[in-house]
Amino acid sequence: MATLFLKERVLERIKMNTWLDISPNSDFSIHNLPYGVFSTPSQRPRVGVAIGDQIIDLAAVAMRGYFQNLSIEPEVLEQPSLNAFIRLGKPTWQAVRKRLTDWLTQSDSPLQHLRNECLIAQSEAKMHLPLEIGDYTDFYASEAHATNVGTMFRGKENALMPNWKHMPIAYHGRASSIVVSGTDIHRPKGQFMPKGADQPVFSATQALDFELEMAAVIGKDTKLGTSLRPEEAKDYILGFVLFNDWSARDIQRWEYVPLGPFLGKNFASSMSPWVVPLEALEPFRVDGPEQQPEPLPYLQTSERRNFDINLEVAIQPEGGSEAIVSQTNFNNMYWSVGQMLAHHTVNGCNMRVGDLLASGTISGNEPNSYGSLLELSWNDERPVEINSNQTRTYLEDGDTVTLRGHAQRDGIRVGFGEVRTKILPSL
Ligand code: CA
């Protein structure tokens, strides 16, 4: 009883109200305040913060002198990427977040007076890729996903490689082809070995797949030669986005030995436009699965290392209605983002502002919680029903794939919006 009372009092303190009208189902509650880059027909790309169905134009706020005592020049916010703002450092992000929270919760605040000049309807804005991404690394940190793929590619006995439970496995991805939600992609071409054939063919992929992932945005450079502890991640990560790491399974399968993924992966990856701050996700930390065998000391952490974030994937065929094909949770990850960062830097490899660390496909243990069509259709064996008269083993031209994610607890919702992409025919 006493615990319950205490919990309610804590929540009372956490829960905040704003003068702005925000739907209780909005991903962009006052507890979120994610960063993005937007433009309007009359304004060049600039930094904004989402709130409800609006965007706070941070550049417009700064131009009116309201960030002067935070030492933020308006030019830093009139940029086509968040990088310059991120470089101001965590104390500045925290100060901006605090100021916006104060303004949104206090009536008669400067923002309330400036609402006509500084609040833009999201429906009138175009969202841009919010980062200049120098490097992108893709991990492979979901045990269910690694087990599923390993079982299909190598058999049940060899599903997890001997190294898998000792380190977060990853490869270096391609940053140049990362696009923002709303950017259509063309079906890629490449060479692959058709089933039963003895010579490879060159063709548009016959096995185009999505991968449901989350990606962390690096918020602080590390020095070449230095390493981070898992607990230090909170000072080096700005926040998270949804990430769809497109895959051409036939190209991937033919090329991946011995050096790993290449053209089957690097034709495109899609990300959501709003970077949800790590601070907004702190109330949703959970323990994560037990790690057995115990990892080496540099990967050990006693913190609650995972996040409880509901995730889903929808497919909408051309002219048809949308079907949810997967529902899972980010709390399924075996390796945490802190462990990924510790592993990535343990040899002295440096991180730079704007780099992305993607989680790898996020799959749960149930067949309807798998994060790719490869797994959902179990390598073509079980076509996925997407409505009464259509099934998919892989994606078809005209399909629109949408990833969504949100954390929710005790009436507080922090969401990621979506990453939506349409598949166009091969060029
Ligand atoms: Ca991936």
Image: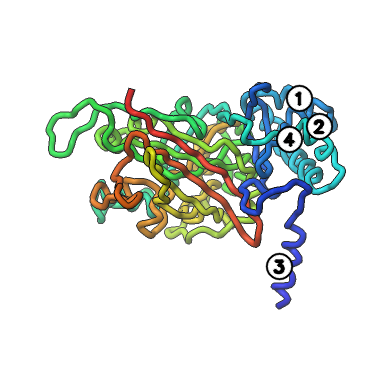
Q: Position of residue 268 (x, y in %)?
A: 42, 30
Q: Residues within 10 Å of mark 2 (few under 14, many from 20)?
A: some
Which label sits on residue 7?
A: 3
At 78% from the left and 28% from the top, the residue drawn is 62
Residue underneath mark 1? 74
At 56% from the left and 43% from the top, the residue drawn is 417
Q: CA distance from mark 3 to mark 2?
A: 35 Å
Residue underneath mark 4? 119
Q: Is residue 397 above or below residue 418?
A: above
- Counting residues from the N terminus, which is met first, the one under dot 3 or under dot 1? 3
Q: Residue furthest front?
A: 319
Q: Evaluate if marks 4 and 2 touch, with contact meaning CB atoms under 8 Å apart.
A: no
Q: Evaluate if marks 2 and 1 touch, with contact meaning CB atoms under 8 Å apart.
A: yes
- Counting residues from the N terminus, which is met first, the one under dot 4 or under dot 3? 3
- Counting residues from the N terminus, which is met first, the one under dot 2 or under dot 1? 2
Q: CA distance from mark 3 to mark 1?
A: 41 Å
